[in-house]
Image: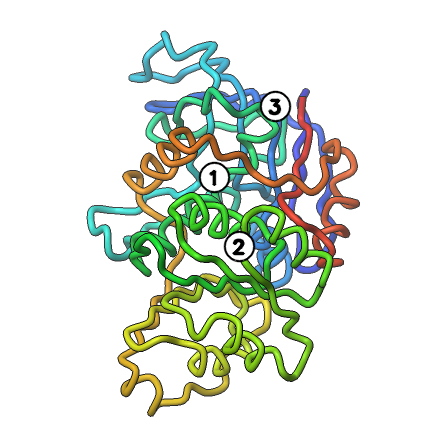
């Protein structure tokens, strides 16, 4: 028997159960997971969804292929792989298809000893990363890559503001932008997180709990070409004052809630573009891995918990004290 952390009902803690080892079917591979990682999506699913039946959550994972189904190459057995959790994107790179899903809900995910996924979703583990580090890449790395490059179309030397630094996607966006020779600034409610971001290459940071933070940002940077935001909420409208003409905002989260208003005049007069984005295509996942390897980038990991302590891991995420990815040790 193997273990899985099941989502059984809205706002209920995940329940670790013993289950039978899954068996791969046509075009699938069976991955023996070594590590998995948490995402805010896992929290939102628990808060917003009502499962028709218990389901194993988890989108990020890395491990070794142990078995293959029909039409999958048996030579894959033993390969060390990372999993792309962006399922059924479709043929249009601009937007996902109607059948798009994210691994972990409603399909069984990576908070388990094993997971079955399509052979199309597995990629060779980056050589310069450990299993632990590789598990911290997929969802957040792909989201950040698409937001920064495909949507905001970052160019070298541009000024980039990344809000809410500390979460996985925000940190990946910062690391990608720094590696691409952008001038990067961050926001946080924690001065400690701002200092950690500066140690990783950010030029300056601003504490958004300070009512004067936008004035400080305007003085320090003079305006931004790109903002990468994962919060939304009431403070979103303040970003428009900070944008350079022709600036681009990419948003992929809602941790601060819905956006109540947008300053329309600034939007059109500055010719600002707002890009909603989520996850990414197979090609973007490959390009993201190429960027990691070519620049020797490694994820920032906050803490590692054994699978049986998954409740503590989620409490860490809920506390908002994390700086980096929260990882689960499976094997």
Q: Position of residue 85 (x, y in %)?
A: 44, 40
Q: In the rendered view, how is the structure colored?
A: rainbow
Q: Residue at x 28, y 39 (%)?
A: 283
- First in sequence: mark 3 or mark 2? 3
Name the mark nearer the viewer: 3 or 1: 1
Q: Circle 3 is placed at which residue position?
A: 34
Displayed quadrant of residue 240: bottom left
What residue occupies the far top of the structure in this picture?
75
Considering depth in this image, is 147 or 94 the residue closer to the camera? Answer: 147
Q: Nearer the viewer, residue 40 or 247?
A: 247
- Element assignment for label 3: strand
Q: Residue at x 44, y 57 (%)?
A: 183
Please, is residue 70 above or below residue 233 in the view? above
Q: Is residue 234 visible?
A: no
Q: Position of residue 14 (x, y in %)?
A: 71, 46
Q: Is residue 110 above or below residue 57?
A: above
The answer, for residue 235, to whether it is visible in the render is yes
Q: Secondary structure at mark 1?
A: helix
Separation of disc 3 and disc 2 at Cα? Answer: 25 Å
Q: Is residue 258 left or right of residue 17?
A: left
Mark 3 in CB contact with mark 1 (< 8 angstroms): no
Count neighbours of disc 3 (C-alpha within 10 A) and say few if under 14, some if 14 to 19, many if 20 or more. many
Residue 207, quarter of the rendered image: bottom right
Gap in Å between the C-alphas at discs 1 and 2?
13 Å
- Residue 99, horizontal then vertical, whole percent: 32, 50
Quick one: label 1, few (<14), some, or many (20+) residues within 10 Å?
many
Q: Earlier in the sequence, mark 1 or mark 2?
A: 1
Label 3 and label 1: CA atoms lie apart by 15 Å
Tell me the tag on residue 272.
none
- On the image, numbered disc 1 is attached to which residue? 138
Q: Which mark is residue 170?
A: 2
User: The C terminus appears in which quarter of the rendering?
Assistant: top right
């Amino acid at each position: 028997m193997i273990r899985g952390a099941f989502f059984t009902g809205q706002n209920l803690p995940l329940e670790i159960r013993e289950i039978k080892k899954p068996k791969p079917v046509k075009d699938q591979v069976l991955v023996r997971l070594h590590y998995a990682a948490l995402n805010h999506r896992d929290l939102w699913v628990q808060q917003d969804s009502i499962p028709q039946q218990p389901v194993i959550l988890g989108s990020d994972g890395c491990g070794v292929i142990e078995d293959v189904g029909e039409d999958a190459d048996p030579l894959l057995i033993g390969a060390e792989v990372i999993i792309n959790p962006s399922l059924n994107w479709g043929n249009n790179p601009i937007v996902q298809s109607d059948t798009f899903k994210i691994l972990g809900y409603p399909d069984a995910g990576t908070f388990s000893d094993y997971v079955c996924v399509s052979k199309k979703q597995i990629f060779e583990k980056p050589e310069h990363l450990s299993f632990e580090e590789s598990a911290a890449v997929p969802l957040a790395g792909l989201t950040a890559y698409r937001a920064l490059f495909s949507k905001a179309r970052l160019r070298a030397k541009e000024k980039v503001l990344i809000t809410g630094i500390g979460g996985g996607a925000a940190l990946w966006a910062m690391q990608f932008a720094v590696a691409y020779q952008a001038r990067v600034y961050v926001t946080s409610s924690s001065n400690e997180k701002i200092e950690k971001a500066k140690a990783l290459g950010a030029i300056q940071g601003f504490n958004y709990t300070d009512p004067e933070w936008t004035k400080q940002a305007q003085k320090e940077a003079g305006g931004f070409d790109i903002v990468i935001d994962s919060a939304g909420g009431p403070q979103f409208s303040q970003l428009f004052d900070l944008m350079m003409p022709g600036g681009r905002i990419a948003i992929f989260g809602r941790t601060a809630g819905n956006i109540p208003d947008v300053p329309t005049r600034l939007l059109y007069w500055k010719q600002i573009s707002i890009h909603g984005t989520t996850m990414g295509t197979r090609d973007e996942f490959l390009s993201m891995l190429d960027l990691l390897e070519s620049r020797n980038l490694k994820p920032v990991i906050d803490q590692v918990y054994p699978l049986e302590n998954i409740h503590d891991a989620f409490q860490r995420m809920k506390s908002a004290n994390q700086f980096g990815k929260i990882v689960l040790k499976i094997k």
